[in-house]
Image (cartoon, rainbow, N blue to C red):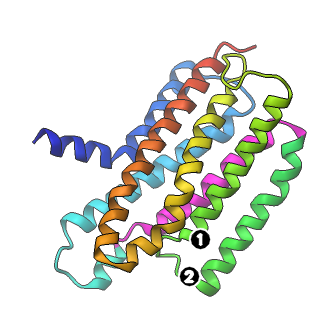
Amino acid sequence: MLLNIFRTFFDWSEVWALLIPLAILIIYKPKGSWITAIKWYLITALILGIIIDFYWYVNKEFWFGVTKEKKNYWDNNKFYNLQSIFRLLFFSWFFAVQSNYFKRITRVVPILFLSFAIILFVFFKSFTILSSHLMATEAGLLLIYCLLYTYRVITDDKPLFSTNHPPHWVVGGLTLYTAVNFFIFLFYNYLMYHSQRLKDYAVGVWDVHNALLIILCISIAIAFYYERTRK
């Protein structure tokens, strides 16, 4: 019984984890220039997370034994694709306000990514299927942002985790999230559609994604908390 409760709680982490930084945002009202981009990422991710988990629950609990077409209608993969697109756009916005160096990069990367997404879903893949190509590309681009940011912090002799530089916490959490999830996203379609044994493994490995999302949300919450006192 207790194990089932924990399992359900963890399965819904794509919703409640986002409430952690949002609660800190509401309570302390930090005012940094980078806050807006992360705020809208959290709100968008929360809305899509609720839809994703609602569709997953309906598909799991109510459509057992019905036609494939009816189950596909309640498939949540298209919302994961949307979430990937919005995550790239909002974090590009976040990095754009960090320095003029990132402003130049973030003028180009989102346009190239959106062009890639349009070509992918118009000519090669259905938008209703979770796309490993899209999500792995998004994770790879965000990881490049993070590594460039970290390189500049190191060359400027700034501490990576400091109360005086709250965005560092966001980048730290995002680096871990993208570095690990890049490989999960890259091979996810292969695992899901190759065999039942690998499909079960893919479902299980998504727990790693959820755990990393929790860490990312806690990192954002810490950044919000420290931003409240920064002048």
Q: Amino acid at mark 2?
A: Lys
**Left or right of 205 in this view: 64:** left
Residue 196: which disc? none
Residues 138 and 52: in front is 138
Q: Please name the residue shown 53% across and 76% down the image.
A: 127
Residue corresponding to mark 2: 125
Determine the secondary structure under disc 2. Answer: loop
Bounds of the magenta segment: 74-100
Q: Please name the residue shown 22% across and 40% down the image.
A: 6
Looking at the image, residue 69 lies above or below residue 162: below
Looking at the image, residue 74 lies above or below residue 70: above
Quarter-of-image position of residue 68: bottom left
Q: Amino acid at mark 1?
A: His
Q: Please name the residue shown 71% across and 67% down the image.
A: 114
Residues 160 and 225: in front is 160
**Left or right of 174 in this view: 196:** left
Looking at the image, residue 111 lies above or below residue 70: above
Does the magenta run of residues contain 112?
no
Residue 80 screen position, x and y as percent: 49, 62
Residue 133: which disc? 1
- Disc nearer the start of the sequence (1/2): 2
Q: Are marks 1 and 2 in contact (CB under 8 Å)?
A: yes
Residue 55 shows in the view: no
Residue 88 screen position, x and y as percent: 66, 54
Quadrant occupied by the N terminus: top left
Q: Of circles 1 and 2, which is in front? A: 1
Quarter-of-image position of residue 138: bottom right
* Alpha carbon distance from label 1 to label 2: 10 Å
**Left or right of 38 in this view: 111:** right
Q: Please name the residue shown 47% across and 75% down the image.
A: 129
Determine the secondary structure under disc 1. Answer: helix
